Amino acid sequence: MAAHASAEGVPESVAFEQARRYAREIVPSFSASAYFGVATRLAKLISTSLYRVRLGHYEGDALAQVDRDATVVFVINHRSNMDYVLVTYLAAERSALSYAVGEWGRVWPLSALIRAMGAYFIRRKRFGPLYKAVLSRYVQLATEAGVTQAVFPEGGLSLTGAIAPPKRGILKYIVEGHDPAGRDVVFVPVAVNYDRVLEDRVLVAAHEAGERRFTARLGTVLAFVGRMLRLRFKGKFHRFGYASVSFGAPLSLRAFGTDVPALADALMARIAAEVPVLPVPLVATALLQSEEPMNRAELDRAVRALVDDLPAAHLHMPRQDVGYLIETGLRMLTLRHLVEEDGGFLVVAPQERALLAFYAASIAHLFPKARG
């Protein structure tokens, strides 16, 4: 605060009040009843209403050996705003999670509920050294106190569907505040994937426009919810396929060391290896292998070849049947009119190839050629 006052030419009392405002904005007011009584139940209801939720890979033995006194930090790839809901639901029995939430959540009354759930707000833009200092100190104090946290190292939703390079801010704060002689920090890589990302068209449009400027208008959200309710009332609602979460092997900060870039890269590599392979991304990958329309037999051969190339990946195989997996993925794509069947051939609408590429990108790194 003194440095800020000197740099800006303002009294220290002014800098102190500004820091106090930042702290009040960041620090949550956790309520156990709000989290376990409302949030986790709502998370389960929303998740299971929209998706067939599946727990992918789970490193149970390694996670069971984590020191009970360690601070656990879940590091998660960011596919959708549903990530908060889905991971809260699947991790509810183990711990309350304190999420790092972007500015989208600072809207009343949503902000009050999010804060009561233990989340803390982060300004992604237009912040200076004083704000960074207050935020870093909060993160360090929470880590020292053993608060279980959940962070998205990519810093925002993936616009391409692929895992993005990490932003190191939160990790840097944690490492700089860590006392090697004190409580250990254990990072748990978490990978999320979907057969349908609710914001997919918005994200693809933002990528094509070359700028990360997109908003979820309240009217658009309400219209979407109303449409889903009408379909459910008519008995025509279909869930959006599968949503899956994998929990990988934990990484100890004490054992790894304090090299922040190396730590960020190691965590992103572990997250990438854990990404679940679901029907829609797999079928989309197969369909995009050719510019020409495929028939069903050709699609079947293409998907089976892809499955054979994924021996180490966490593939969700519905009913343990590749044929049923293909039908499941193709049904989702045809229901959304991304793929049409014409004369026995599966035709990808030209204007929808970018959307199929968005889903294919989520698993592209798992194939041997991509790894090579």
Image (cartoon, grey):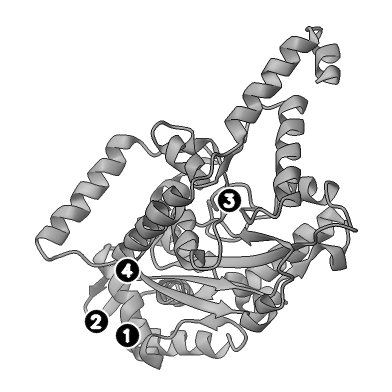
286 with respect to 361 (left or right): left
Q: Earlier in the sequence, mark 1 or mark 3?
A: 3
Does residue 358 appear in this view?
no
Q: Are marks 1 and 2 in contact (CB under 8 Å)?
A: yes
Question: Which image quarter is the N terminus in?
Answer: top right
Label 2 Cα crowd, 10 Å radius (few <14 / some 14-19 / many 20+):
few
Say how many tags the image has. 4
Pointer 1 residue: 296
- The three-letter amino acid code for the residue at tag 4 is Leu
Residue 333 image label: 4
Q: CA distance from mark 2 to mark 4?
A: 16 Å
Q: Is residue 260 visible?
A: yes
Mark 1 to mark 2 CA distance (whole Å)? 8 Å
Tag 3 or tag 4, which sits nearer the N-term? 3
Q: Quadrant of residue 293?
A: bottom left
In front: label 1 or label 3: 3
**Which residue in the protein does label 2 denote?**
344
Q: Amino acid at mark 2?
A: Gly
User: Marks 3 and 2: CB-CB under 8 Å?
Assistant: no
Left or right: where 269 falls relative to 113: right
Q: Image point 85% across, 18% down: which residue?
A: 2
First along the sequence among labels 1 and 4: 1
Q: Quadrant of residue 108?
A: top left
Q: Amino acid at mark 3?
A: Ser
Inspect the image, locate mark 1, and give the three-letter code of the amino acid beneath it: Arg
Q: Position of residue 292 (x, y in %)?
A: 40, 74
In the picture of the structure, the residue carrying the numbered disc 3 is: 98
Q: Measured from the top left, where is residue 207 in percent x and y?
A: 52, 47
Q: Nearer the viewer, residue 99 or 118?
A: 118
Dot 1: what SS? helix
Foreground mark, 2 or 4? 4
